[in-house]
Amino acid sequence: MRPVPPRPGQGASAARLAEILRVDHAGELGAVHIYRGQRAVLAATPGQERIAGQLAEMEAQEAVHLARFDRLLTERQVRPTAMAPLWRLAGFALGAGTALLGEKAVHACTEAVETVIEEHYAGQIAELADRDPELAAELEAFRQEEVAHKDQAVEAGARDARGYDLLSAVIRTGCRAAIRISEKI
């Protein structure tokens, strides 16, 4: 993803930073709810304790990211996205839906989401490297955890999911749309 050049005009940097924080907060909120939806299905399914435990660990990491963005929104006086209630619901539904499709679909979902998020964070890091190196460093640490989630999903057979290409394409498209919407609304 190409870095977004700073906008011209007074207040442009602050407006762009608000978009970055808003969308990152929304993304972490969605991720937490995706894992919750997956765990709601799999924790109640006999024989799925191992994957439910893995999902709980990933959800906990996303919750740490979300808590950090909660603080950043407050510190920098940025409003969260108005779409938060919908993202909670959509995330949970995506998680539960992929869990109902099976373990491989769960991993395919994780890979698709984390691929988009990794690319998104990389663009933001490049954009912020000179303007806000401290925030860029935090985003890099988060990006590395997202990469680890993606790699774990691939190793667990994400690409073996039935209908992988379609499932992955739909999830990635949805993530990209949510990013664009959350930056503005």
Image (cartoon, rainbow, N blue to C red):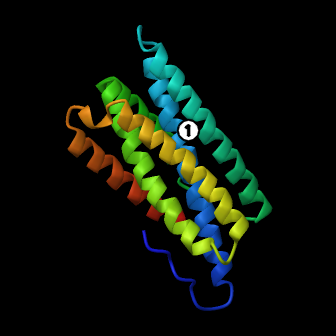
Residue of label 1: 32
Q: Quadrant of the N terminus?
A: bottom left
At horizontal 24% and vertical 39% (from top left) the residue drawn is: 164
Mark 1 residue type? Val
Q: Position of residue 7 (x, y in %)?
A: 56, 85
Where 112 falls versus 72 (above or below)? Answer: above
Q: Position of residue 163 (x, y in %)?
A: 20, 37
At horizontal 64% and vertical 65% (from top left) the residue drawn is: 136
At horizontal 63% and vertical 83% (from top left) the residue drawn is: 12
Q: Is residue 84 visible?
A: no
Q: Is residue 137 visible?
A: yes
Badge 1: residue crowd in 10 Å (few <14, some 14–19, many ≥20): many
Where 40 falls versus 81 (above or below)? Answer: above
Q: Is 103 or 78 nearer to us in this picture?
A: 103
SS state under label 1: helix
Where 71 falls versus 127 (above or below)? Answer: above
